[in-house]
Image (cartoon, grey):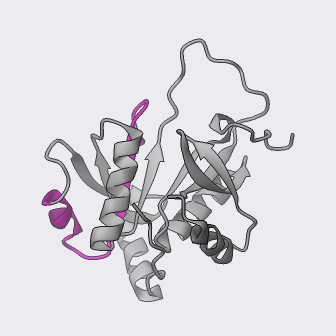
Amino acid sequence: MRAQARSSPSGAIREATTRIAQSLPACLPPQSSETLVMVLNQVPNTLEQLRSVVPRNASLTICDYLGLNVTRIGGFATPTLARDWADYLNRAFGYRTFTTVATAPTPNPTPQPGPISYAVLVNHYNRADLLNQVQQATGRRVTVVTYDQRPHLLVTNTSDWAIAAGLLKDLSDRGFVTLIVDGRQIAGLRPVGG
């Protein structure tokens, strides 16, 4: 599967989407160990279109996610399945999608040094050209890391939620399959400030 970067929406669409999002209820966060697919609502009938495509057991809700009018899709059995659906909706239908995860406590956790950090990742899909596209889009040096046994592009690792959320919105607007995870879950990352 391949993610395709799409051009960002026009200012008018983004402004209208943001205005509409301000009147929506806030999206519920993912439950423990849940991965959600978020789809930017760019047309009035996005919800109806998605209902005809996603699995019947998926739960769909229109809500405000960080100031964006999105359809929140839950009910995926695994994080991999959720990411595959996000990619499919992006490639096959042109929806701007991203995933968001809840960090589940692990049995007998090993304490990780340093404060919590927010790592912004873009699914790499083993495409060398994607690294250059993300670097050009963000103006940042991007590296390849492994998360959930898959290659991802690390855009940033920060203790500032606002910075992470802003990058997530920007990259999602550009069509990249993006997620925010606890940076301590990525092997080889040094703690923020460490």
Q: Residue at x 17, y 59 (%)?
A: 53
Q: Would residue 163 be found to the left or right of residue 11 on screen?
A: right
Q: Would residue 27 be found to the left or right of residue 171 on screen?
A: left
Q: Is residue 91 above or below residue 161?
A: below
**Region rendered in magenta:** 24-52
Quadrant location of residue 92? Answer: bottom left
* Residue with the most extreme right position: 194
Quadrant location of residue 9? Answer: bottom left
Q: Would residue 100 be found to the left or right of residue 130 on screen?
A: left
Spot occupied by residue 176 in the image (x, y as percentages of width and height)? 49, 66
Spot occupied by residue 83 in the image (x, y as percentages of width and height)? 40, 50
Magenta run includes residue 44: yes
Quadrant into which the N terminus falls:
bottom left
Q: Residue at x 67, y 72 (%)?
A: 138
Q: Is residue 24 above or below residue 117?
A: below
Spot occupied by residue 157 in the image (x, y as percentages of width and height)? 71, 50
Q: Residue at x 60, y 74 (%)?
A: 133
Quadrant location of residue 167? Answer: bottom right
Task: Count all numbered tags in the image, as a single digit.
Answer: 0
Spot occupied by residue 88 in the image (x, y as percentages of width and height)? 32, 61
Magenta run includes residue 117: no
Can the viewer see residue 40? no
Quadrant into which the C terminus falls:
top right
* Nearer to the camera, 83 or 31: 83
Q: Would residue 41 be found to the left or right of residue 35 on screen?
A: left
Q: Is residue 41 above or below residue 29?
A: below
Can the viewer see residue 148? yes
* Nearer to the camera, 75 or 82: 82
